[in-house]
Amino acid sequence: MSQENAKYTSYQNMVAQVNTGMVQMEKLAASMDLEENRKALEKSREKLTSHKFAVGILGEFKRGKSTVINSLLEKEIMPADILPTSATMNRVTYDLTPHVELLMRDGSTKEIGIGELPAYVTKLSEEYEAQAAQVEEAIVYYPCKFCQNGVDIVDTPGLNDDERMNRITEEVIPKLDAVIMVVTPDNPFSMSEADFVRNKLMTSDLSRLIFLVNKIDLVRREKDRERLVQEIKSKIQKSVMNKMAELYGEDSQEYRDAQLKVGKIRVYPFSALDALDGKMEGDKELIEKSGTIPFEEALTKMLTEDRGALELGGPLNVLDRTALEVAKTAETRKNALQLSGEEFASRQKEMLAQINDMRRQKTEEKKRLHAKAVHTKNELESEVRRFYPELKTRLEEKLEQTEVDPATLKNEAGRSAAAAALQKAVSDEMKSSLAIFTEKMETKLKTIVGEEAVRLGEFTEKMSSQLDGFRRDFAPDKGLDTTNLMAIGVDVLTDFMGLYGIAGIVSGYREAGIKGAVAGGGVGLVANLAAASLLASMSIVGLPMLVISCAVGSVVSKKFAGFLFAKDVGQRKLNELRTQLRKNLEEVLDDMESGRELENWVCQRVEQSFDELTACMEDECEKMLKDTESTMDAIKKDLVQNEVQRKKLAEEYDESLVSVKQILENLKPIHDRVRRVLAEA
Ligand SMILES: Nc1nc2c(ncn2[C@@H]2O[C@H](COP(=O)(O)OP(=O)(O)OP(=O)(O)O)[C@@H](O)[C@H]2O)c(=O)[nH]1
Ligand SMILES: [Mg+2]
């Protein structure tokens, strides 16, 4: 256990060290008048230190989700019971003093003691259930070691319990950074779990998912336990691979990448009850038997190393780029000290003209980007239109192929059951077709946006090297001394930046392609920088669950009044039933088509992605251009100084270079670690 604690402390240390390095670099950037670079650094640092990481516990009702959390808290905090229990979302967050805050649906908050929890978050009695209906979310403050460093553990009501519970849980899924899926031996990998893997998960999310086969204590024989875990694992793998085959085809690179990833899927046999009892009673043997040790190790790794790489990659990259800017600026300003007033004036004029020209190019790029967005919208919209008839055929086939015994249609109850079964078959098919289709659209969009990001990456890189060229020409007889830059550790930088940044996106893309990156192949794309943040979906689900559940909901809610009261039975009745359902289906699909919800969603996603991309490019370019302008103003001021003062300035610039090197050297071990983890991801 102490080893785990060390990992949390070391994660904390890493964040603290990167934070310190960033603060130091911000000061250096400010002293060098690189305000835009400083601001970018500050923004990235604030994001790093304030980001929460949410781990959700999901699963069908009564799988032992709340008990799993209690085992992590080492105390019975979350209400758990043999009856369906959890009725609200409960979030465990770190605080030394345990207490509970209720966020009510009417917007108010309420403090209660931990002992009062059952009365507000469960449906163990009618009174409790009524109270729980007023609660939006319960926040449980508790000194849990897993919640250090801004981790929240989210307990959810069981999937498949009732509609309202389902909705609560489906709403929270996109806000999760990682998921622990709880299944049990009595009903391993049931419909709703298969549905989760198939419909709510991007294949790239697998590394953020842990499966627990809970209540393993109920399986008496060791041999059976192993078999069970194996079976569940292969069911999950099959489900993922079927989806990949459907999305990309079996002979695609994506399929092969997924095969590699799926081999590493994490499934642990577990007994939450034994783990909890063992911890509360200090019974080492029971703790060992419960399976909690390997599970907690995996969880810790996810919350420290994996998370560290994901969250530190971006900030480190921003830091590196600023370091490079500070170093180059210090060199330029030192060299410029030797210029005469006239020499400077003429170079400045030239430089400003170049900057103007670059701004013009930037505007051109933006126009191009806009045109591409419009084109993409049209392209994807027509795919949506082609999808409707395809969907219709598929659903009608499902309707025909779902078997119903005509003999069951004798009474009203039998007819209702048959209608319900047919409806369910159709709406399940609808849900899964829509999920696959939207993921396809999402992937397509990522490919297009990815190609644009690569092109823009090349554009900004070109701009940057042009500016470097001007800087070099600024004092040509004492040009920018790159050997000096190498000496201060720029080799560390360029080495590292091959993996991240715009350059990283370019190379990551070339290596794996966006589709490969979506499946988890492209290392550079995972870095949380600029365009990369929109390429790698950061939430567990990137799919429009709302559109999907609305569409499905409407098939279910259509009425069947006409046939339910008819008297005759048999095959003819069944055909009538199917015809009626087909008519309903047609109406639903017509509604869907005329409502344009899918088209609207597609357009929104395209706009969002392109807006983000445009903003990234704008920021990236302006950072360079504005800071170059400031450098020029600063040089002008430097040149007014007398000989003695200039000498002092030159010394200061040398010192800045030394400081840059120092900061980079301090962070080198973290760089290396982050890089290693990302390369393995
Ligand atoms: N044998 C055994 N029982 C367990 C284990 N974990 C939980 N249980 C029991 O399973 C029942 C349900 O546990 P909960 O933790 O309330 O399950 P849940 O998934 O949170 O249930 P809902 O919130 O209603 O969806 C309780 O009676 C628990 O004591 C376990 O590892 N082994
Ligand atoms: Mg529960």
Image (tube, helix red, strand yellow):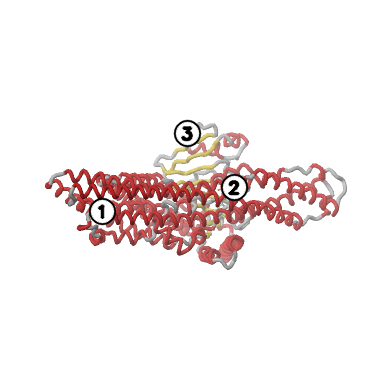
Mark 3, ligand 2, within 8 Å: the answer is no
Q: Residues within 10 Å of mark 2 (few under 14, many from 20)?
A: many
In the displayed structure, 202 sits above or below 152; it is: below
Which quarter of the picture shows residue 46? top left
Give 459 or 562, whichever is nearer the viewer. 459
Give 189 or 308, whichever is nearer the viewer. 308
Q: Are marks 3 and 1 in contact (CB under 8 Å)?
A: no
Q: Point out residue 172 in the picture as x, y percentages from the top left corner.
A: 54, 45
- Quick one: which residue is furthest to the left in this view? 644
Helix, strand or loop at label 1? It is: helix
Helix, strand or loop at label 2? It is: helix
Horizontal side of residue 554 vs 539, given as left or right: right
Q: Point out residue 451 in the picture as x, y percentages from the top left corner.
A: 48, 57
Q: Point out residue 450 in the picture as x, y percentages from the top left corner.
A: 48, 56
Residue corresponding to mark 3: 111
> Between tags 2 and 3, which lies in front?
2
